[in-house]
Amino acid sequence: MKTPPMKTGFITHPLYLRHDNGAGHPESADRLTAIEEALAKTGLRSQLERITPSLHPDVSGWITEVHRAAYYQSLKEISPERGAIYLDPDTRYSPGSLAAAEMAVSGLLTAIDRVMEGSLQNAFCAVRPPGHHAESNRAMGFCLFNNVAIGAKYLQKRHALARIFILDWDVHHGNGTQHSFYNDPTVFYFSTHQFPFYPGTGSENERGIGEGEGFTLNCPLSAGSGDREMLTRFEKELFSAVTAFKPDFILLSAGFDAHRDDPLAGLEVTDAGFREMTRIVKSLAETECQGRVVSCLEGGYNLAALARSVGVHLEVLSEKGTP
């Protein structure tokens, strides 16, 4: 009997909706609802394997591979029973936030396991809260735990992979992810982002230190840059970095706030741009690491643009190659 082709995984969980940032906050549960509604309207949802993850049995252990145990413990101790507190000027912490953040990590680890065992061709994790600004010892920029950084550690320690490539195309530089691996030659961090802009990191001269020097590559873009500038970076710097590094797995911090309609930034990427960016990443993964790529939602705050961008991203990920 012929084995049916593997599908693209779509990982999400109801707990992600319980992280409550309050009225008017751009990082809201409506983001995931908009994605779900768009997938249902286009019929794309039927082409995906929908996965509701369980809490990873050692989620605490994996979180503390990246974050200090004291920071994690403090989040447990200050978790409010009602109302909310602010961990920084942008990052609200509600009664459902810690459970959502732990499940966001678990969702990514589940996607990684499924791709590694060969039951998914690749996967997209529609999680919240996002993660790439979270530092080892503090929340920052809407983020509690650095999902993708934890995923990289998991791939190395649970699945014994040697080299992990992290691509971050969020409009904001992933300071937390960069700092997690700044002296580590086994994890390559590549970022395209608007610069200068929040959080202030991500200049071209930030290239890593010690043994990690040369394994961080920042490609800052000026406000007003769009598809042409972004794709030039992908076709030159990204292609060269991936083919030279020869990763065993690609993790993608998939923020869609570089879209021209996004209210929080000033890049001009279109739906077509995100489609081609995904196509390049998927092609590189197929050439260099057996197609192993998992993307994890970061930013994207215009609901219609986010839903369309995720839609084209998933269309490309779910396309079947030549048998």
Image (tube, rainbow, N blue to C red):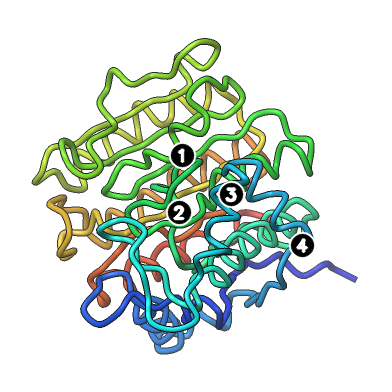
Tag 1: amino acid:
Thr
Asked if 79 appears above or below 186 in the picture, the reply is below
Marks 4 and 1, how far apart at CA: 28 Å
Earlier residue among tags 4 and 3? 4
Earlier residue among tags 1 and 3? 1
Marks 2 and 4, how far apart at CA: 26 Å
**Residue at image x 79%, y 36%?**
160
Asked if 198 appears above or below 275 in the picture, the reply is above
Q: Which of 170/87 is in front?
A: 87
Q: Residue 90 appears at what percent x and percent y?
A: 27, 60
**Which mark, by number, is residue 131?**
2
State the image quarter where residue 15 is shown: bottom right
**Residue at image x 14%, y 43%?**
225
Q: Is residue 319 visible?
A: no
Tag 4: amino acid:
Ser
Label 4 neighbour load within 10 Å: few <14, some 14-19, many 20+: some
